[in-house]
Structures are given as structure tokens and as C-alpha cells.
Image: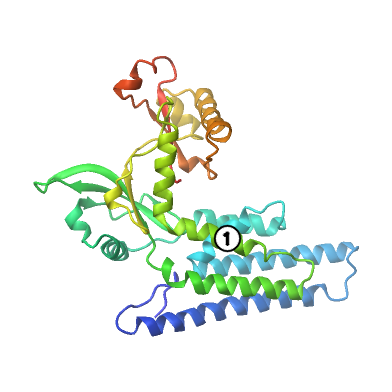
Amino acid sequence: FEDRRGGLSGGPFEPLTLYVAAIVRGSRAAVALVRVAADYKISLRGLEKSTDEYRAALAECHSRAAQSVLQLCRQQAGVYIKAGQLLASLRPVLPQQFTETLAQLCDDAPRSPLHDVRRVFREEMGADMEQIFHHVDPEPIGCASLAQVHKAWLRQDDGGEGRMVALKVQHAWMSRHTRSDTLVMEAAASILELIFPAIEIKWLIPVFRRNLESELNFLSEARNMQRCAFNFQDMVGVRVPTLLEHLTSRRILTMEFINGVKVNDVDSLRARGFDPVLVASNVTRIFGEMVFCHGFVHCDPHPGNMLVVPRHEPAATAARSRGKNEFDVVVLDH
């Protein structure tokens, strides 16, 4: 009844299978924790910490433990992948074996089948996707640990094909196991600190839970988009996609689709006539404005969240935007 992402078979027995699946997932995490803890205890027993033998054995333990955590995150998916990505970002805190191994999770997000996407949309919008969209591309253009994005074309009043939009849909399984998974992680962190007093990891759990709750509510992202768009309404060279509020909810976010070049794709930038030096300068200017003027900062500025497109010029700003810098930096994923 449980697939690799924590999804359930549904039907009248779904509440029961939800509890059983939570027990299975918790047990799986507990087994992994016991194996890792036992490996450290057995492998390092009797070794002096100051010796090369101890350091070599410790490095091997780190490598095996990192592989075990990676395997667990992939098997559990959902919240576990998000947690693994957080651990991968803690380079000054965790051993190199963990951060390098878990970094694989950043490019290893699960996909929801289209029937799950349809179900989430129907539950959130109270209508089938076919009633709203003329066509939805079944292949997602982007997948992350919490959601995936599809190209979609709105349905016009006459039934014809309308404008193209980006449809972000939360994975169906995310809301089912979030609470039980985070409780298991909290218990695991407590046990690790008891077994290994030198480890301090419990402080991560409240931070992770707070960030996760915000990311699972797409209305929060929608508000951030609107605030960012307002802050930059008079600034040339930056663009925020237009939000479709009537097609946005806690698990659905619909916005204008913008096709651009990633800011770090130097060859493609030059091929399209964009100067990479000017692009870098504009990105610096945008984030300087956020930090020193707005006090409202986009804290996930990786290349996938910043695209370069030809200048979009409303009549009010066209007169001010002439010159070599004829492009916009599109800021995504707020």
C-alpha cells in the first residue's frame, strides 16, 4: 500500500493505511539509525582519537553513514529529501562525506504521475484541470522535493487555447506524512545526541519544521512574489512573473510562464546577445537593492531561480530603458 514516495492506495481504508504506512516509514528510519550508530560504536571501539588509525576509521564510518542516509532519503522521499538537501548545505558543520554524498539529492527529486497532479488540482480548485486548461503538458519542466512544475495553456471562453502559464503542483504525498516524518526525525536527533554527546543536531529540527511549513503553503510564496513585484515596480532590469491569484491555493501556484536563460549559462547568454558581465552586474544590483533598500531578501538565489530574457518594456518605463542593457533578470521561486 505504500510506494517509494510514501503515497497510499487511497479508498475507504486510507485512514488506516496512513497510520500503518507511518509506522513502516518510522521503523525504516529507526533501523537505519541503529545500523549507523552501531557501525560507529563498533568501528571506533578501542581506538585512540589522536591516532591516524582512528581518523581513517572515522572517515570510513562517515562514508558508510552518508550512503545509508542517502539511501533512506531516496526510499522515503518527501520530507526526507528536503531534510537531506538541508544537511548537504551544512558544509561548515557536517563532515565532507555527508555534504558531498547528500548533494546528490539536489538533482534527484521524485516525480508525481499526472493522475496525482490532476487529483491535487481538483482537491484544491474544486474543478478538473480540463475545465480550466486547454492543455497541460504531461512532462514536468521541473521537479523538486516538494512540488513539480508543468506548462499549461488556459482554456478560452470559446474553448480555444489561451495564454501559456506555469502550473506548480505540490506532490500528493507531501501532506500525508509530513507530521509523522518530522516527529521521527526529532526522535532520531534526540537519540543521536544521547548516543554521541559530542553531536549537536536537535537545533536543526525547529528550523527545518518552520521552513517546511512555510514552503508547503504556496500562498506564502504567492505573497512573497507580490511583495517582490511591488518592491521592484519602478526598477528597470528586473522582472517577477505575474501571479494568477484565482488559480493559486495552498498546494497550487499558477503564474505567467517565462522562458529564459539561466544566469550562469554563459555560452547561451552570449549566443542570445546578452553580455554576461552586465548580467552579473544587474544581479548584484538587484540583490543589493533587496538587502540595503527593501529589507526583504530572496534567500535561494541559485541559477535555476534567475533567468535572463529580452527586456520587457511597459510604456511607463520604455523611455528610461534604452541602452546596451536590454534584458531583464527574472526572479523565481519566492
Q: Is residue 255 above or below residue 54?
A: above
Q: Residue at x 51, y 65 (%)?
A: 79
Q: Residue at x 67, y 62 (%)?
A: 203
Q: Residue at x 63, y 66 (%)?
A: 67
Q: Residue at x 27, y 62 (%)?
A: 118
In the foreground, 209 or 116: 209
In the foreground, 82 or 208: 208
Q: Position of residue 183 (x, y in %)?
A: 56, 73
Tell me where residue 116 sits by quadrant: bottom left
Q: Is residue 181 above or below residue 149?
A: below
Tell me where residue 323 sits by quadrant: top left
Tell me where residue 148 sits by quadrant: bottom left
Q: Position of residue 259 (x, y in %)?
A: 35, 37
Q: Element at badge 1?
A: helix
Q: Is residue 210 left or right of residue 218?
A: right
> Which quadrant of the figure contains the N terminus?
bottom left
Q: Amino acid at mark 1?
A: Phe
Label 1 environment density (alpha carbons within 10 Å; few <14, some 14–19, many ≥20): some
> Which residue position is annotated with label 1?
208
